[in-house]
Image (cartoon, rainbow, N blue to C red):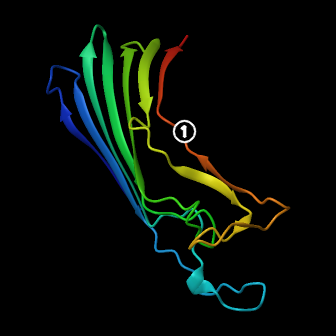
Amino acid sequence: EFEGRALVGKDFAGPGSRLNFNWSLGYLDAGFDTFIDAFGVDVADQRVFQNTPDITAHVGLNLGLPVAEGMLDFFGSVSMRSDASQFEVPNPFLDQDGFELVDASIVYTDDEGRFSIGAHAKNLFDKEYIVAGYNFVSGGTGGVPFTPTLGLEGTLTGFYGDPRRFYVTAEVNF
């Protein structure tokens, strides 16, 4: 994993202004050397590490401008994950393709640190992405009907990450 941050500019838009940049990059080459199933067969080449993307990345920017005896900060970020499988056995219905999430915020903080107020947007482009699921069925691909593996009806359920959200925050320190 690599991380970095830099003060790109200081006092460029007047005394106290700043421009910061931060980033991170993660790479994981995970694989099973051996994976013995219930029948004593090594199925390592058919298994993957669950919920483990090969690549993760993040880029963030913060522009701070002195305004009205305080600091007005503009934050923006993009986070990325490559493809990931929800379980050790890949499942085309629940596995998540790679995706990016974009967030943005505007926050005003007074110079004394007594209060701040902010407006925030998370998942700005309303990306749907799976974070978990249950798979109690088999089949369902290549025209094969679903067959329950738990109970009479079975369950195939995906749980999704937060949709686009807008919210405000206020903080008072005393």
Residue depicted at x 62% and y 73%? 89
Name the side, left or right, on which 18 lies relative to 51: left
Residue 115 spot, x, y in % from top left:
46, 12
72 vs 124, nearest the viewer:
124
87 vs 59, nearest the viewer:
87
Name the side, left or right, on which 167 lies relative to 104: right
Q: Quadrant of residue 161?
A: top right
Residue 150 spot, x, y in % from top left:
82, 64
Residue depicted at x 25% and y 17%? 66
Decide: is 169 above or below 52: above
Q: Which residue is mark 1?
A: 162
**Amino acid bearing label 1:** Asp
Name the side, left or right, on which 84 lies relative to 134: left
User: Outermost residue, bottom direction?
Assistant: 41
Give the quarter of the figure containing the C terminus.
top right
User: Outermost residue, top direction?
Assistant: 68
Name the side, left or right, on which 73 lies relative to 174: left
